[in-house]
Image (tube, rainbow, N blue to C red):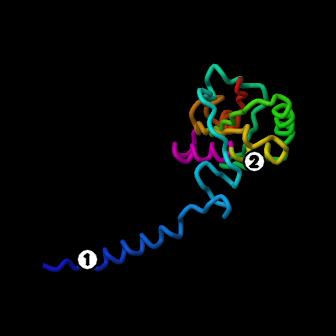
């Protein structure tokens, strides 16, 4: 018995396998992602036992950086906060965890990714201001742990942020 859809299935399989090569990860040298590399700047090894909400991390030492709706671009109005954080971090000589957060609009997966892009944008800005990359880690909580559990634009604006945690 001949299956009429078998040739079409074989063609689809061949095309999907060949297209995977188009999406393979580029190495860090090629400007892509390789392991823990993001935007070409390697992430340091995780600090053992350091969690953003753990007892060995001081939070609130630096002002949060806020973002526009569905954005991970650091606005000009937030640059002063980043400059103050960069200066303070360089003076502390301690590791810092940057946590990205979102409001609760969007899927959990999308918000987790957006939170990570926000944390990475802050990290890259700090690196450009002279903070050593090896001292900056990122984490995303997405829509978890809102600063304001309410709904409406005022609450959403407080939740679209990146916060800093200084490892003790």
Residues under numbered marks 2 and 1 in contact, where contact means CB atoms less than 8 Å apart: no
Q: Magenta-highlighted stretch: main secondary structure? A: helix
Query: Which one is earlier in the sequence, the residue at label 2 or at label 1?
Result: 1
Front residue (pair 152, 61): 61
Q: Residue at x 31, y 78 (%)?
A: 8
Give the class, few, some or many, for how many residues have Cα within 10 Å of label 2's Cα (few <14, many ≥20).
some
Residue 152 is inside the magenta segment: no
Image coords of residue 61 (percent x, y): 78, 25
Residue 105 is inside the magenta segment: yes
What's the distance in space between the residues labelled 2 and 1, CA to CA?
50 Å
Relative to 133, is 34 on the left or the right? left
Image coords of residue 26 (percent x, y): 60, 62
Q: Secondary structure at mark 2?
A: helix
Q: Secondary structure at mark 1?
A: loop
- Quadrant of the rendered image containing residue 163: top right
Give the class, few, some or many, for how many residues have Cα within 10 Å of label 1's Cα (few <14, many ≥20).
few
Q: Which residues are magenta?
A: 104-119
Up-down: is 96 above or below 79?
A: above
Q: Which mark is residue 116?
A: none
Q: Residue furthest left?
A: 1
Up-down: is 36 above or below 156?
A: below
Q: Residue at x 69, y 46 (%)?
A: 120
What residue is disc 1 on?
5
Image coords of residue 87 (percent x, y): 87, 35
Quarter of the image that includes the C terminus: top right
Q: Which mark is residue 124?
A: 2
Q: Residue furthest top?
A: 55
Relative to 157, is 63 on the left or the right? right
Q: Residue at x 69, y 54 (%)?
A: 39
Front residue (pair 157, 75): 75
Relative to 70, is 76 on the left or the right? right
């Amino acid at each position: 018995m001949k299956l009429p859809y078998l040739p079409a299935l074989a063609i689809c399989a061949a095309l999907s396998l060949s297209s995977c090569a188009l999406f393979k990860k580029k190495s860090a040298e090629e400007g892509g992602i390789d392991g823990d590399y993001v935007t070409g700047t390697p992430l340091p090894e995780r600090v053992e036992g350091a969690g953003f909400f753990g007892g060995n991390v001081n939070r609130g030492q630096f002002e949060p950086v806020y973002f526009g709706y569905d954005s991970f671009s650091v606005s000009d109005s937030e640059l002063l906060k980043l400059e103050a954080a960069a200066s303070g971090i360089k003076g502390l000589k301690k590791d810092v965890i940057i946590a990205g957060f979102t409001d609760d609009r969007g899927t959990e997966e999308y918000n987790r990714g957006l939170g990570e892009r926000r944390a990475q944008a802050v990290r890259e800005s700090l690196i450009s201001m002279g903070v050593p990359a090896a001292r900056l880690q990122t984490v995303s909580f997405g829509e978890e742990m809102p600063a304001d559990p309410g709904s409406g634009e005022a609450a959403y604006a407080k939740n679209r942020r990146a916060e800093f945690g200084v490892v003790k």
